[in-house]
Image: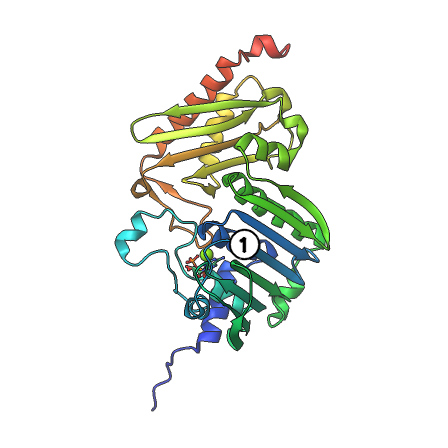
Amino acid sequence: MSDIIHLLPDAIANQIAAGEVVQRPASVVKELLENSVDADSKKIQLILSEAGKNLIQVIDDGKGMSETDARMSFERHATSKITNSDDLFNIRTMGFRGEALASIAAVARVELKSKRPEAELGTSILIEASEIKSQGPDAVPQGTSIAVKNLFYNVPARRNFLKSNPVEMRHILDEFHRVALANPQIAFSLTQNDKEIYNAPAGKLSQRIVHLFGKNYQSQLITCQEETEWFKVSGYIGKPEHAKKTRGEQFFFVNNRFIKSGYLNHAVQGAFEGLLKDDCHPFYTLFIEMDPSKIDINVHPTKTEIKFEDERSVYGIIKSAVKQALGTHNVTPSLDFDM
Ligand code: ADP
Ligand code: MG
């Protein structure tokens, strides 16, 4: 009897991996924006058509790629961000798995244009379902532009599974908000179906918050800051009276990476105890900085969940920082509402 096990061709392996990394247009938006951040861009443009179903394009003015790197960037496990396993415990970039572009190119038509600052000419690549259709020198601006067209055109089940444009757009905005909040020093713009939705210049975090969420946030932000030997938290919380029924505007970043943590959210919510009406949720944008070796960000492919070595201490510091911030603004239950 002959053997029956064989290695899958790259295109199929990539398509399987894509199932984990690319769930919907918003996943592509997240990966492309993060790559542009990692490339030290000063300005990042996001252009969408039909909530990303037809086009997701990210244009940056970052460090660009050489001709070979541009080709390599679509290989699975190809990355410039880590080289050995020690690096896994000291990650400062958003990406490191080298999976995103390979996955995206497995389930879409992708056009990449890129030029390094020192290069005279840049390069253009067209790739479809993991297959490079063309590559050649091209007179393109410094930085990188990646256009992802007809997402899931070759995976009909996924394509049909996409939700309505408003729903997909909401997911995209969530990702856009997270990256834009984490990087107020970078200018961001967002255009959907030729209409400009955001154009946020580089500035301070408070300005970015106001730009993204509205002018009324100007008067509701309370500075929150605390530092210990191994841990720093800083950012803003919203005044309790501005808390909303929805939970959407709550952001934790650890070493500039957005994370979801019910546990830490509980710490904040706990600090607000007695100050919130009914089931309201306060606004917060909090940045935690700590030694990357004390956290594990490798638990999930999309990297929104992380593990802390000492979760309880983190909880305690966050809670006390928020309490203190509320205290310095003289917000106490008796002063604020008649409870
Ligand atoms: P990762 O970000 O995990 O390294 P990706 O598949 O997202 O993996 O990208 C692969 C590589 O392509 C990156 O490591 C980087 O070297 C390069 N790259 C991707 N996007 C950009 C960009 N916008 N500017 C410069 N280089 C990029
Ligand atoms: Mg990446």
Extreme residue toward the front, this view: 120
Instruction: State the residue in front, 147 or 4.
Output: 147
Question: In the image, what residue occupies the spot 48% across and 68% down?
Answer: 16
Q: Residue drawn 45% across and 72% down?
A: 13
Look at label 1 and name its amino acid: Asp
Question: For mark 1, what is the residue?
Answer: 60
Most foreground residue, 72 or 290: 72
Element under label 1? strand
Q: Is mark 1 within 8 Å of ligand 1?
A: yes
Considering only vertical position in the picture, is 125 above or below 30?
below
The N terminus, quarter of image: bottom left
In the rendering, at what x and y percent does residue 54 appear?
67, 63
Q: Does residue 3 appear left or right of residue 106 in this picture?
A: left
| Ligand 1 falls in quadrant | bottom left
State how many labels appear. 1
Q: Quadrant of the C terminus?
A: top right
In the depicted structure, whether residue 268 falls above or below residue 291: above
Answer with left or right where residue 68 lies relative to residue 171: left
121 in relation to 326, above or below: below
Counting from the top left corner in percent of width and height, residue 245 is at: 65, 30
Q: Position of residue 212 (x, y in %)?
A: 63, 37
Identify the residue at horizontal 62%, vertical 68% (top origin).
157
* Circle 1 residues within 10 Å: few <14, some 14–19, many ≥20: many
Residue 117 in picture, x, y percent from top left: 46, 58
